């Protein structure tokens, strides 16, 4: 029986949670104002799984706990290239929030602002370039980032769908890059 709490701790500790935003909200009642708190939390295992959650309560710790539980329930898997960056560039949007995420070379780091940085750190991405356009509302930025991440596809998934081998897909992708580089060199 003594092992069960330890196993639960291991399961809990495999996730990294980042508090993105806390909002204090007021409800006006007969005696004055009643304050509550809304929390936005991003949770990830730093190996390709990430989720976000929103929780509201009268106290900050309770709001964070509710948001963390919601985030663990809504986790998605994102295919990573070499376990450190994304496979291809994608754009995502939610409401007025628009984001563009691009893979980056080794050693670039996470070039992203606020809420997007929390998502990438929780996801385990080490090298990425991201730009937020439109709103700076953290809720919409996180949802737009998740929209972009859901569009990520690995070469293995594309090859399986097309009935080809992974090497054919990767050769074609690299070949297109070389053709563009050669065309640019000839035009210069």
Image: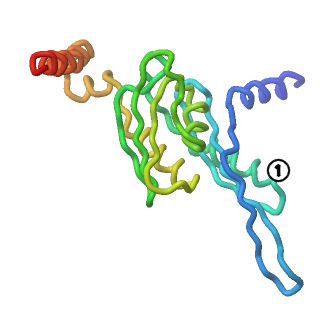
Q: As rendered, which of 140 and 179 lies closer to the eye?
A: 179
Q: Is residue 133 left or right of residue 32?
A: left
Identify which residue is drawn at 76% across, 61% down. Answer: 37
Identify which residue is drawn at 56% across, 26% down. Answer: 124
Residue highlighted by disc 1: 61
Position of 74 relative to 2 (above/below): below
Percent x, y of residue 97: 46, 54
Q: Is residue 170 left or right of residue 149?
A: left
Identify which residue is drawn at 49% across, 33% down. Answer: 77
Q: Is residue 86 left or right of residue 71?
A: left
Name the image quarter holding residue 38: bottom right
Percent x, y of residue 75: 56, 40
Q: As rendered, which of 44 and 27 lies closer to the eye?
A: 27
Q: How many residues crowd mark 1 within 10 Å: few (<14), some (14–19), many (20+)?
A: few
Color theme of the render: rainbow
> Which element carries disc 1, helix, strand or loop?
helix
Position of 18 relative to 142 (above/below): above
Identify which residue is drawn at 45% across, 41% down. Answer: 131
The number of numbered discs placed on residues in the rendered structure image is: 1
Q: Quadrant of the C terminus?
A: top left
Residue at the extreme bottom of the image, as rendered: 30
Percent x, y of residue 137: 56, 56
Q: Is residue 25 left or right of residue 133?
A: right
């Amino acid at each position: 029986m003594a092992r069960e709490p330890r196993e639960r701790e291991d399961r809990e500790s495999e996730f990294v949670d980042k508090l993105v935003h806390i909002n204090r909200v007021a409800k006006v009642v007969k005696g004055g104002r009643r304050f509550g708190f809304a929390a936005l939390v991003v949770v990830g295992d730093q190996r390709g799984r990430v989720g976000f959650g929103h929780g509201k309560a009268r106290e900050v710790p309770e709001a964070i706990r509710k948001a963390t539980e919601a985030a663990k329930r809504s986790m998605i898997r994102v295919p990573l290239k070499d376990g450190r960056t994304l496979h291809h560039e994608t754009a995502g949007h939610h409401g007025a929030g628009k984001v563009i995420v691009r893979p980056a070379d080794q050693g670039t780091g996470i070039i992203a602002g606020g809420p997007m940085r929390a998502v990438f750190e929780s996801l385990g991405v080490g090298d990425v370039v991201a730009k937020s356009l439109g709103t700076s509302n953290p809720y919409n930025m996180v949802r737009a980032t998740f929209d972009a991440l859901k569009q990520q596809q690995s070469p293995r998934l594309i090859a399986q769908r097309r009935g080809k081998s992974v090497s054919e897909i990767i050769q074609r992708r690299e070949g297109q890059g070389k053709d563009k580089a050669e065309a640019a060199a000839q035009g210069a």
